[in-house]
Amino acid sequence: MSQKTDITNLMESFSRLLSKSWSEVCSILHSEEEIDNWLQCNWETLVETNVETQVKQPVRLPPYGNGADSEGGSSRVTFLTELPNQQIVLSNRDMTDSLDVLMGERVNLADVEFSEFVAITGDGWFERQPPFDHVLAFRGDTEVVLPLAAVTFHSTPRG
């Protein structure tokens, strides 16, 4: 398997990993806290290390979703005292603004930061479940949910 060299391909691979492994993960780990810890561990191991290879410097990303809760005051499972120095941001895959599934409005993705992959449920809300084909992101404190197919991902310095 060749190493991913593009942040969008890396993020899509992580989404597929979650979709393929989710039922097994949920059969082994039973609490939300255990699942959050597993997600954060995989985020750091698979995504952070690959982003590090691409930007050629140490990378610490913001927590995936809720982050881990196994180490007290840190949301991380490695490098517990280090703060995020990069972030995953979104841009539109084409030249039009993406449609926020929750509000039904077009969203300019400037200053929108990735949080986690989710799916849209039958009632139009989002859940952390397969097929993980949507992106939960935040602009400040405002939730934005976008189709994965509508966005590209980039790593930028956090500051």
Image (cartoon, rainbow, N blue to C red):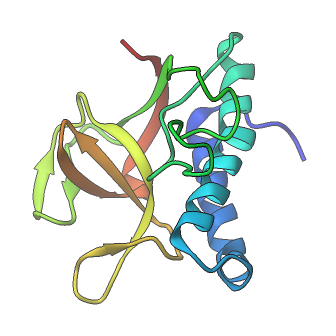
User: Going 33% across and 41% down the picture, which residue do you hit?
Assistant: 94
Nearer the observer, 137 or 150: 137
Horizontally, residue 134 falls left or right of residue 26, namely: left
Question: Is there any visible trace of residue 47 in the rendered image?
Answer: yes
Horizontally, residue 20 falls left or right of residue 117, namely: right
Q: Position of residue 27 (x, y in %)?
A: 70, 85
Q: How many marks?
A: 0
User: Going 67% across and 58% down the picture, which residue do you hit?
Assistant: 38
Horizontally, residue 67 falls left or right of residue 24, namely: left
Please, which residue is most extreme toward the bottom here? 122
Nearer the observer, 76 or 7: 76
Q: Position of residue 6 (x, y in %)?
A: 64, 32
Nearer the observer, 80 or 153: 80
Q: Quadrant of the C terminus?
A: top left
Q: Position of residue 158 (x, y in %)?
A: 41, 17
Q: Is residue 159 above or below residue 25?
A: above
User: Going 21% across and 52% down the picture, which residue do you hit?
Assistant: 143
User: Going 10% across and 63% down the picture, which residue do you hit?
Assistant: 103
- The quarter holding residue 76 reads top right
